[in-house]
Image (cartoon, grey):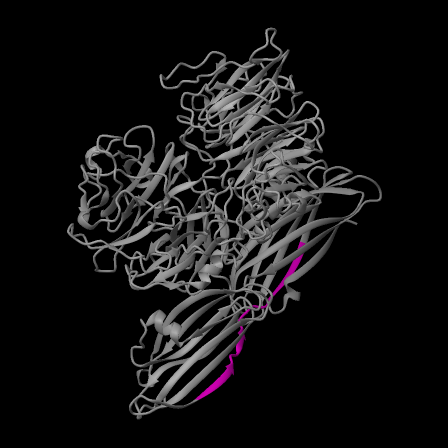
Amino acid sequence: MTPLILRPILCLSLGRLFSLFFLLVSMSVIGAPIVITDINPDQSTLDPVDPDGATGGRINGVATTPGNTNIYYAASEFGGLYKTTDFQVNGGQWFRLEAHLPMLTIDVESAPNGAALYASSLYDGRVNSVAGINVSYDGGTTWTNPPTATPASGTCAEAAAISEPSATGIAVDPDNPSAVYIGTNCGLAISNNLGASWTYSNPFAPALARTIWDVVVHHGGIIDVCGQIGSARSIDGGVSWSIGALPVGRCSIAASPHEADVIFATRGAWVYESDDGGTTWTNLGTPDSRRQGRIPFVETNDRGNDNFDLWYGDVRLYRAGCTSNPANGGLRCPMGNLDLSTNPPQPAGWAGPFTRSVGGHDDVGSIAFDPAGNGVNDCPTLFSSDGGVYYNTLSDEATCHDPQWEQPAVTPHALWLWAMDGFNPAGVTNLDLYAGAQDNGSYATIDGGAASPTWVNRNCCDGFDDTAAATTVLYTICCGSNPSTRIHRRGQGMAGGAQLPAASYPQSGLLAGFKFPDNFDRYGPSDYVAITRDCTAGSNGCVGADGGLFITNNITVDPVIWTELGNATEPPSNLLCAVKSSRAPGGQPVFYVQTGNCNGNGNSDQLWRFIGTNPAGIWQRIDTNLASGSIGIFDVDPNDPNRLYASNLLASSPQMVFSNDAGQTWENNVNLDLAMSGNGQFKSRTLGTAARGRYVQPSFVSFDPSDPNMMIAGAVDSGVFVSTDAGASWLLVTDPHTPVQTGRPHIPHPLYAFFDHDPADRTDIYVGTRGKGIMKIGFRPPATGFKYAAKFVCGDQPDINGLDLVRGRYGTTINIHNTTQSETVFQKQLSLSFPPEEQRPGQVLPIAWDWLQGNQSLKTDCDEIRNRFYDGSFPQGYIEGFITIRSTRPLDVVGVYSSGDLTANGELLHSSIDIEQVQERDTRADLRVEKSPQVFTFDINDNLALHLVLYTVNVQNLSTHDAFNVSLADSLALAGSNVVSAMGFFPSPIDLPPGGSVVNTTSGINTATIDLNLGDIAGGATAITRFWAAVITYQTGFPANADLVDTVEVSSPGGDPSPLNNTAVVTTPIIP
């Protein structure tokens, strides 16, 4: 008789059973204290109506994999390399190749069938750089930077090119796939063995080698290059060169598919043709009346029968129909326009534009053609621009050459932000986030706390200056009409609203654009401050010429009324570039402005302060007492106008400095300096080359508005750092070295932060970047299995009659040492005790979460506690209690206690010192797991059978300590002969303990897994769970036998003192 519990299962068809096996759920369990999540939008909601709204960010080069139509690559300008493995499905789901460490990527190319993958990048800031030339032999999973890819000393025109390598255009020889050529900032790098080793050639010798921007190899190994000082050709593999007459500067180069001596190049905004191998060049002009010349490109595509297309991209993408070997000689491709002053029509022979009007974003990067083609009439399949990558929806060779572009299923996440802000309503997922990006526009979400927020791309183009309130967001958009930087005011999530009318702008000056700090800040519910720069009246929408700082106490009215502050003593208003406000509880607002370029590198940027809202108030410059006399970045605590952080741009090396008195005095934070330099692994100030100019590491610092002890800071190359003790110590929370192994992605060039403390037991910091959009850094309280309580007495007890402590001076230092080789996370708290006559407990004051790497030490002492909690003076002369420490790993904790006698006049007499080893308390739970199966077998025919297994798992907590967040991992495997199976766990267990949940299930051939979260198990308690596994076996021969081998393991994040009983293995025969 069939057991009742099985009847619903057996009513299912065999096909339905298989469907259930492969209906998988995927979730993640947070087991580490730091979790980094990419929360960027996958697609633009604006794209269907305006493709200049986008989410991909700037993409430079793209590459196909010859012989594979699904694998494509993209090199983003600031966010590293991307790949898709399913291009044929709506353009693919693009993902970042985290193992490729350099972020400023220029080009990427693949050898046929992926035998080697080459990537070029600009300098990465490291003392021992891995930038320039990188090679992968496994499709981008791992990378090498071959030692021979570094040029020889003394060969480069720029000495820094040795220690600060950069690489640019890549060309694989179509006739010899093992040969590859890469332009660098010290000539041309050549490899003839798939990138295993490299030699260098200098096309412009005897002059020292300079930057080669692009290279093409064609017609049996002819090499043409263009670079910093012109063009050159080699017909002998780079041994000797002939110099051409192409104008110097940033360029791109391509070759005719038919004639070896016909080549094309771009230089600036112009297209050039040479019909004599580069000796002379003809300027064809441009087909693009909007041309800019930022990074234009040329590519050729053979159309057969002496016909080919010349593809040219600047702001927009165009295609010229060209003819090889013309009967009467002359140019192969049609002329463009040379004189754009009269806004001429599109020149004859050029088709296009193929960007915004056909589904693609303007400001182009590169183009790729069908890798499955035979090299003739191949369809353009992929196009890149400042909006990301776009695939061609037309695949028929008769129509595809006039492409219709579409954003892929998942775009790259390479956004370059100019602004980010947020507002935090109640609720874990309820979080308003706003961002403005270079080229891609403005964004908003109202569920920023969700695992995958829902984003709205509200406007196209360039977005700046996000400032958010509960029901209002103020932001700016550029460009297209006057004034260039225009103010928009909308509701929550950028709903409704519109661009403000001219009457609602500050009455003089214009808002600046293309700078990282904002033109706005909010210092009250509807109170906003704005800065403008000097402008020419009557030009670009400028009404009044004099810029300045303006405030309004109601941003919601029409028109908005602005009042200028301190015009008579204002800072240089032609250079205003950032404003931040601070307001102590019950106090008046204080405004800080930065003047200069606000890019972190300016050696003349100044910092000024204005107190209050009186228009006649006085401005004061507060950076003149810094050693450099200038700043790079700064922030002010929004709740304490006296508390500042800034970068001091010393010529030798920048320093991070702080002030607790509104800039009257400054102190150097050495620990943050070390963090910015990665403890010496990154250059604090680079030397700079033509490929990548000079810069310094510090990119931003930010105070948490809700927690005065929490801060975040970041550097261009070395990562993101967090402090939980008001800046005393800093932890690197990203991984610029081994991000794949640690699961902590590298976050380059962080610029903004927004803090979220909902729910109260965790902190999420949303970091806005230049190149990776918005990344969420989540801090979860780790499970702590070890506890220490150290007596703590600090201060003076002057009363000779006191009975709690004898008269004297008392000092305590608690030293903490990580004895392991692994990172240890621990929490420190101060638990105060009151005098005995009060008979009640004192306050419990959280000090900080701290991190120690292997063998590192730190201390907590009286000075730290006095300054942190008591503003430098204990309230009654002294305090008494315990410093409690909860740690994820064992620590050495030692208390050092000093005391001395005090005279009636407060003089210190003889003193003593005692040292005490603080007792460790192991608070880890001891878990034991046991498992038993019930098997029900149903023969379908002689060879095919269905086996349903009901597993019962008991997890007992043998200790008196509670076990938190207990995980159960169960794996099932088939062992036997002449049998194959399909198996899986049903994703809905029959029984789960309270608070339990299914985390993940997998099904497969001969293997299956299920992961559960059992919640918390109290000391001495037992959690019971039951779940089904289904196995279909097919006997392939005789004799057949099969056992199910099930392995179950339980764990809790705090660890287990007896791990041997955390695992159980059960073997169950199903075919004897």
Residue 952 makes an appearance in the image: yes
Q: Per the image, is 132 magenta?
A: no
The image shows residue 686, relative to residue 330, as above or below, that is below
- Looking at the picture, does residue 808 appear above or below residue 867? below
The image quarter in which residue 72 lies = top right
Span colored in magenta:
912-933
Q: Is residue 472 left or right of residue 936?
A: left
Give the x, y percent position of residue 2. Answer: 65, 46
Coordinates of residue 675 in the picture (x, y in percent): 48, 58
> Residue placed farthest to the top in the image?
327
The answer to whether residue 1 of the structure is visible from this angle is no
| Residue 251 x %, y % | 52, 29
Q: Residue shown at 33%/46% (left/top)? A: 596
Closer to the camera, 286 or 1004? 286
| 719, 983: nearer the viewer | 719
Residue 925 sits inside the magenta stretch: yes
Q: Is residue 1068 left or right of residue 928?
A: right
The residue at 40%/23% (across/down) is: 290
How many dots with numbers?
Answer: 0
> For this rendering, which residue is in front, 219 or 638?
219
**What secondary structure is the stretch in magenta mostly built from?**
strand
The vertical placement of 563 against 909, above or below, is: above
Left or right of 701 on screen, residue 736: right
Q: 968 or 784, which lies in front?
A: 784
Extreme residue in the right direction: 1038
Single out the residue that lies furthest toward the front.
206
